[in-house]
Amino acid sequence: MPARTHRSRKRRSFRAAAQPEGSRPASGVTLSPPPFQAKASKGPLQREEDPEKEKKKSDFDYDISVLPPEAKLSLGAWGLQADTSAASFGYKDDDLAAKLTYKYGGALTAGLDYGQFAGTAGFNPSDKSSSLTAKYGAGSGSFGWQPQNNLLSLGGKYEDFNAGLN
């Protein structure tokens, strides 16, 4: 008979533990937690690594999206990107960035950024026009030429001052 009493006690304590908060247990029943409780481990779940080592390990990266169609590929400091309007190939390091871009049916441009200096040279084979721009700090200047229209353009900007000549 004591074994039967033991079973009924377990059943009562389980019911009492499952009661919602604020309700009072039946008299003579003690509340106790369920017999098994999982404990969280104190150690880290993942190994911590140095971000520099992680960066060096993952030199190769790619990203492809279907809508809108676009593909990106990077191998260390070198990168290649293409979408429905342009394709570009570039190099980017700490202070130096260089990029060559072709817009489909349009211009071929080359760009260079170094510190505060940025420059771009472009050529459009469809209308034989060319352009050259330079920027340093807050100032910038541009030069453009279209031989078919005999059009020459010059421009400049420094902070709030703009100048242009066609």
Image (cartoon, rainbow, N blue to C red):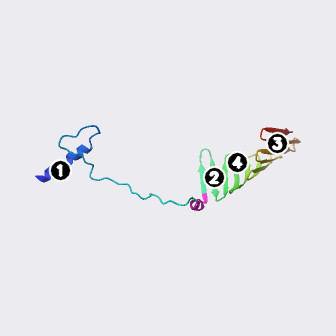
Q: Amino acid at mark 1?
A: Arg
Going from the N terminus, do you reach mark 1 or mark 2 first? 1
Going from the N terminus, do you reach mark 1 or mark 4 first? 1
Question: Residue 116 location in percent, x, y?
Answer: 74, 50
Q: CA distance from mark 4 to mark 2?
A: 12 Å
Q: Amino acid at mark 3?
A: Gly
Q: Where is residue 142, by image quadrant?
A: top right
Viewer-proximal residue among 12 and 131: 12
Q: CA distance from mark 1 to mark 2?
A: 66 Å
Going from the N terminus, do you reach mark 4 or mark 2 first? 2
Q: Which residues are magenta?
A: 52-60
Drawn side of residue 107 relative to residue 51, left or right: right
**Farthest-out residue, left:** 1
Label for residue 152?
none
- Secondary-structure class at tag 4: strand
Q: Which residue is mark 4?
A: 86
Question: Residue 87 location in percent, x, y?
Answer: 70, 50
Q: CA distance from mark 4 to mark 3?
A: 27 Å
Q: CA distance from mark 1 to mark 4?
A: 76 Å
**Quadrant containing the C terminus in the rendered view:** top right
Q: Are marks 1 and 2 in contact (CB under 8 Å)?
A: no
Q: Where is residue 41, by image quadrant?
A: bottom left
Whether 140 is drawn above or below 75: the answer is: above
Label for residue 72?
2
User: Secondary structure of the magenta portion, mostly?
Assistant: helix
Q: Are marks 3 and 2 in contact (CB under 8 Å)?
A: no
Label for residue 7?
1
Q: Nearer the viewer, mark 4 or mark 3?
A: 3
Drawn side of residue 25 relative to residue 127, left or right: left
Whether 96 is drawn above or below 154: the answer is: below
What is the crowding at mark 4: few (fewer than 14 residues within 10 Å), some, or many (at least 20)?
some
